[in-house]
Amino acid sequence: MQILADENIPYIKEAFSSLGKVRTMAGRHLKRSDLGEAQMLLVRSVTQVDEKLLSGSAIRFVGSATIGLDHIDLAYLQQQDIGFASAPGSNANSAAEYVISALLIIAERQGFQLSDKTVGIIGCGHVGSNVLNKLKALGVECVIHDPPLREKTGSQDYANLDTVLSADIITLHVPLKKTGRYPTLHLVDTHFLAQLRDDVILINTSRGAVIDEIALLKTLTTRPAMTVILDVWQNEPDINLSLLQRTALGTPHIAGYSFDGKVRGTEMLYSAACDYFQISPTWHAQKPPPPLTQLSFFQSINDNVAIHTAVMACYDVRRDDAALRQINQVSHPSAYFDQLRKNYPIRREWNCVKIILSKEKTILTTRLRNLGFNSSTTD
């Protein structure tokens, strides 16, 4: 079997070489002629997989190492009897860690405690529910809005949109839907923005087109107290540099880019492909050791200081923000944006770090454990 795979999917050759001959490619500019005689195509979100790409090809199975599916024409794949698998939830923890890191940074800058704020979570699937659990670990009051889930479950835990929009912080975790009962294309438009608090903190780690960027720019011009954190952009990689200048934190679509999340995506695709072609799986990822393995704190450490220190030691969003802001100094901004993603440094998730605390710190130990750290007490 011939396999064509995005070169940025980790362990791709090691994992799939047992299934066939693997050829790698850069995904964003993939064309029909690049497919050759490949029967399996493995992509990320930068590759549009539709009739234009696949018509007349030998592709029998498509795998996407992503949560989102807006780049995949599922109806066409089904029509052509082409197998498909994605990696739902693979990078949900990574994206949630990004949100917590970003919020702790803004809280420090603006001089408030997260536990004094209310967070509105729009979209409570894999990522949104992870964010919810981590915010609860920090003692933050949350309100959630997810009409499809409310309809599916019948639960009364979901608030209406007006209630969520009154929150101090709004974080978006919805798929990009252009049609249907609950479209999300330009969900954040002029009307949406007008209902927010003047000093709201707005975070988007879902898809760029969920926000009407023109409307957001106009709003930021007249309401400068608004704080915006953006990891996703409407016309990636050709992003709106004027909007970047207005953000408190801006990053190149890497919220879900932890090494662990990427590897989980590869593992999920490999398992699905083996199942589809009825082949016994033989590969298991061998991850390198994390750069940070253990932290310890004195008994006198303040809980909030300990949490902030632990999070920033593992992942500080400001590093990615600083890297993206260099885009104003390069000749080809869109190529630079892609390079930041392609050459993204290894970032490990918080559960790789063991935190040692004194036995009196039982509350802090629990909070850190619920955030995702491997925390324990010692005598």
Image (cartoon, rainbow, N blue to C red):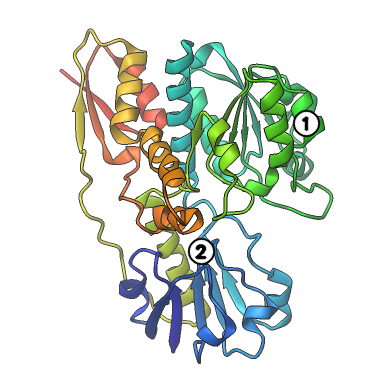
Quarter of the view holding residue 360 = top left
- In the picture, the disc for residue 272 is none
Quarter of the view holding residue 221 = top right
Kindly identify which residue carries mark 2: 44
Please say whether residue 160 is visible from this viewpoint.
no
Which type of secondary structure does the marked residue at label 1 adopt?
helix
Residue at the right extreme, as displayed: 181
Q: Quadrant of the C terminus?
A: top left
Q: Nearer the viewer, mark 2 or mark 1?
A: 1
In the drawing, does residue 79 fall left or right of residue 17?
right
In the drawing, does residue 280 fall left or right of residue 72?
left
Q: Position of residue 196 (x, y in %)?
A: 72, 22
Is 205 rendered above or below residue 87?
above
Three-letter residue code for mark 1: Phe
Kindly identify which residue carries mark 1: 192
Q: Position of residue 66 (x, y in %)?
A: 52, 58
Which type of secondary structure does the marked residue at label 2 adopt?
loop
Q: Nearer the viewer, residue 325 or 148?
A: 325
Is 268 rendered above or below residue 127?
below
In the drawing, does residue 128 fall left or right of residue 189?
left
Residue at (69% x, 34% y) in the render: 216
Three-letter residue code for mark 2: Arg
User: What's the distance in space between the residues labelled 2 and 1, CA to CA?
Assistant: 30 Å
Q: Position of residue 232 (x, y in %)?
A: 56, 46
